[in-house]
Amino acid sequence: MFYEVFGLRKEGKLPSLVIGNLTVGGTGKTPMVMYVSNLLRDTFSMAVLSRGYGRSTKGYLELNQFSMVSAVGDEPFEIFENLDSVPVVVCENRLKGIENISNSFRDVNLVLLDDGFQHLPLKANGYLLLCNYNDPFYSDWVMPAGRLREFAFSAKNADIMVVSKCPSGLKETEANAIKARLEKYSENVFFASYKMSNPMSLNEGTSNLLQGEKVILVTGVANGLDVKNQLIGYAVEKHFNYADHKAFDVSNIKEWIGECMLLNIQNIVVTRKDAVKIQDLIRMNNIDILGVSFHEIHTEVVILFNQEKQFKNSLINLI
């Protein structure tokens, strides 16, 4: 309110679209950033800007093939690794970040902000807000009583709302009931399921894990139990479930390998966000993984009720 009353919010040097949430973690923001980037790539030349949560550095940094996860943050690194020809930068000052992007990447005409719904100095062209189907913000409380970053009425700042992590078979009657709860915040409400990918070998880049295989699961994300529940068709014998943005160390990896030897298991499944950190640790410390294979999984966004085209057009109209 302070920024609005005194006119302190500023537009960036380039058009910008914020993809954010009210809840601390667990809404599926990073997969949505990558989905939107791919969805709009035939319309805009984009860059992705993130603050780089948990990184060891400060200021503006452009990710490249020599970037370290610890220096830029796990989520920006994951985005950089999986979006072709899209610049990814980190900067806690979003206005400064957009200005530097405009100077460094002359062809960019849209900046996607991975988070930034609460970054008041920036007045973006559009705001996409995620609401977790399993934990909707309208049923939650502000921290520390709940997991909201700010009060639910802040959702009125959203131009588009996406109910994320819905069941793929969500009934329209239930969706309409949820939509009725959300329309007081935004008239543009969409629903998305988050489909789990098949496990892919980190070394070979192929899906070679057989159905029914015994695995150890490692998660350092907001909702590790959700990942376990979606890993259908594999026998999870042990789940190492860490806090979001877990900074793994050598002892963690040796513990997982030791558990594999104890249980006679040859495969460890990790999330794509965690994989980038784990690979760095193994390579930099020359860890002997004793023949154990690592496989990564990730979520893929699907807009429900055949509304992907409508969703795309709604995004374009904001810019």
Image (cartoon, grey):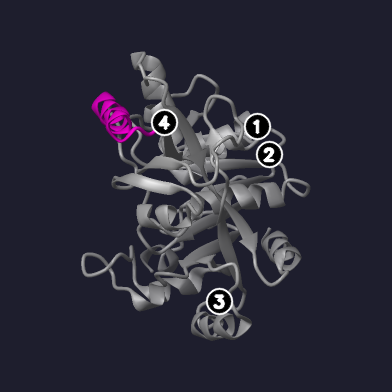
The x, y position of residue 260, in whole percent, is: 33, 32
Mark 2 sits on what residue?
A: 108
Q: Residue at x 52, y 29 (%)?
A: 202
**Dot in front, 4 or 3:** 4
Where, quadrant-wise, is the N terminus in this rendering?
bottom left
Nearer to us in this view, 109 or 149: 149
- For the residue labelled by badge 1, is the local secondary structure a helix, a strand or a loop? loop
First in residue order: circle 4 vs circle 1 = 1
CA separation in Å, label 2 and label 3:
29 Å
Q: Mark 4 is on which residue type?
A: Gln
What is the C-alpha distance between the residues marked 4 and 3? Answer: 48 Å
Judge left or right: residue 264 versus residue 270: left
Q: Amino acid at mark 2?
A: Val
Q: Is residue 80 above or below residue 316?
A: above
Place of residue 32 in the rendered image (x, y in percent of width and height, measured from the top left): 56, 54
Query: What residue did someone put label 3 on?
Result: 186
What secondary structure characterizes most of the magenta part? helix
Q: Amino acid at mark 3?
A: Ser
Tell me the crowding category of disc 4: few under 14, some 14 to 19, or many 20 or more residues within 10 angstroms, Cα based. Answer: some
Q: CA distance from mark 4 to mark 1?
A: 44 Å
Element on which disc 2 rests: loop
